[in-house]
């Protein structure tokens, strides 16, 4: 059944749709290590790998964290500061730096730019920047004030569904629908890395069944690329994966990120899978013509058949024959027909022998078994 969800237009040339290509986001997040030059390098790599969009994360720290959270000691191996606030501040770009990155991505590199808004102030900033969509991460999918603020921008929302049960998910969908938001839901498991046995990709199809008017995607944090390819195969219309220069770098997201060569392979594999998915039809394909002409079987006289003879099943056998005669899928259609021309044992029975329409020689067997003269 075709997905009736309305297309979500992001730019003049990019949409999230039921029939178009999957929208692929390279999530840079904070894998730039607070280094502006590295952020630009990752933008360029994402473009070279074939991603449709680069995405960062934007936080206004006093809006996202309370004072006690910001002053909490944070001295682990991934820390960039003695406190959690100092650590997050080190990794945070200013509004001006975000504007510079946006200009670099869109005007110099030629790739879409957006970010996850981690608080309401960041929603306002991204809206003023004119981003094509606002990402709502799993940490905010139950944050009703932020959802309201984001929906009020009128911009499309991509909302991850990690750390939710089905009740939460239904509430989220109801909230966004009542807000008249344009949105897609991204199946997600918020673990870094996420174990394969807990990913439940079959829920993508269930999401499409539960909310047929809503586009569904996948935000992956697992190791490798196979799961993302499978997600597209089962219906994801948006795909998001983290990008890093090196998984061994300092930071909690790097381990579940893709290195450049992997992202390139993933994008190519997704595009190949999309070609292979094709349409929900079963018909003889043009590429099968050569095999049909070589190996296709047709009706052959099982005994001498005089002119005027009325055919019964015992008169026929099926063989690869030269010349190619009536295809074997017409076996039952010829029973009861009268021979207009005599055929000897083991000769091909041709369409004109029975007054039937002959298939074109460069095609396979006819699709319509009733297509007689």
Image: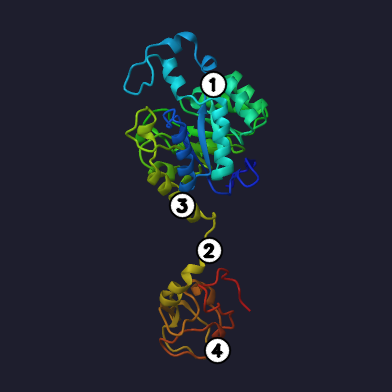
Q: CA distance from mark 3 to mark 4?
A: 54 Å
Q: Secondary structure at mark 3?
A: helix
Read off the residue under disc 3: 273
What distance separates the C-alpha of mark 2 from that of mark 4?
35 Å
Residue 354 percent coordinates (x, y): 56, 83
Sequence order check: which comes first, mark 3 or mark 4? 3
- Are the two marked residues, 1 and 3, in contact with CB atoms closer than 8 angstroms? no
Residue at 42% across / 82% down in the picture? 321
Judge left or right: residue 197 versus residue 332.
left
Residue 290: image location, x then y, percent? 45, 74
Q: Are marks 1 and 2 in contact (CB under 8 Å)?
A: no
Cα gap from disc 1 to disc 2, whole angstroms: 46 Å
Q: Callout 1: 10 Å neighbours few (<14), some, many (20+)?
A: some
Mark closest to the chain's N terminus, 2 or 3: 3
Q: Secondary structure at mark 4?
A: loop
Mark 2 and mark 3: Cα distance apart in space: 19 Å
Q: Residue at x 60, y 25 (%)?
A: 123
Quadrant of residue 366 in the image?
Answer: bottom right
Rendered view: 112 above or below 355: above
In front here: 226 or 104?
104
Disc with the residue nearer the chain's start (1 vs 3): 1
Pair 2/3: label in front:
3
Q: Is residue 299 above or below residue 15?
A: below
Question: Which residue is disc 2 drawn over?
Answer: 283
- Res 142 label: 1
Q: Which is nearer the N-term, disc 2 or disc 4? A: 2
State the image coordinates of residue 26 (x, y, percent, origin top left): 48, 39
> Which-is-in-front pick, marks 2 and 4?
2
The x and y percentages for residue 243 are: 42, 38
Give SS at disc 1.
loop
């Amino acid at each position: 059944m075709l997905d009736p969800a309305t297309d979500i237009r992001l730019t003049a040339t990019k949409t999230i749709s039921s029939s178009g290509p999957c929208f692929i986001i390279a999530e840079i997040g904070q894998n730039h290590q607070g280094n502006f030059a590295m952020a630009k390098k990752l933008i360029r790599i994402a473009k070279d790998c074939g991603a449709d969009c680069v995405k960062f994360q934007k936080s206004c720290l006093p809006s996202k964290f309370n004072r006690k959270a910001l002053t909490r000691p944070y001295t682990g191996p991934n820390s960039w500061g003695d406190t959690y606030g100092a650590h997050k501040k080190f990794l945070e770009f200013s509004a001006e730096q975000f504007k510079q990155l946006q200009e670099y991505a869109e005007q110099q590199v030629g790739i879409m730019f957006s970010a996850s808004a981690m608080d309401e102030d960041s929603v306002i900033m991204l809206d003023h920047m004119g981003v094509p969509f606002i990402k709502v991460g799993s940490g905010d999918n139950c944050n009703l004030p932020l959802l309201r603020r984001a929906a009020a921008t009128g911009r499309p929302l991509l909302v991850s569904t990690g750390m939710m049960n089905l009740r939460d998910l239904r509430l989220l969908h109801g909230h966004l629908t009542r807000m008249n938001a344009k949105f897609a839901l991204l199946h997600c498991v918020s673990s870094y890395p996420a174990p394969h046995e807990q990913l439940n990709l079959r829920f993508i199809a269930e999401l499409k069944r539960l909310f047929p008017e809503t586009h569904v995607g996948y935000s992956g944090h697992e190791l490798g690329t196979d799961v993302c390819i499978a997600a597209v195969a089962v219906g994801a219309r948006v795909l998001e994966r983290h990008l890093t220069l090196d998984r061994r770098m300092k930071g909690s997201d790097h381990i579940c990120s893709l290195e450049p060569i992997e992202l390139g392979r993933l994008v190519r594999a997704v595009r190949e899978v999309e070609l292979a998915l094709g349409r929900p039809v079963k018909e003889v394909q043009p590429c099968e013509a050569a095999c049909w002409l070589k190996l296709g079987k047709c009706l052959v006289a099982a005994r001498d058949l005089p002119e005027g003879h009325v055919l019964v099943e015992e008169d026929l056998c099926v063989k690869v024959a030269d010349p190619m005669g009536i295809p074997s899928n017409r076996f039952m259609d010829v029973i009861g027909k009268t021979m207009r021309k005599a055929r000897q044992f083991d000769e091909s029975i041709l369409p004109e022998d029975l007054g039937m329409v002959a298939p074109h020689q460069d095609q396979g067997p006819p699709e319509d078994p009733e297509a007689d003269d």
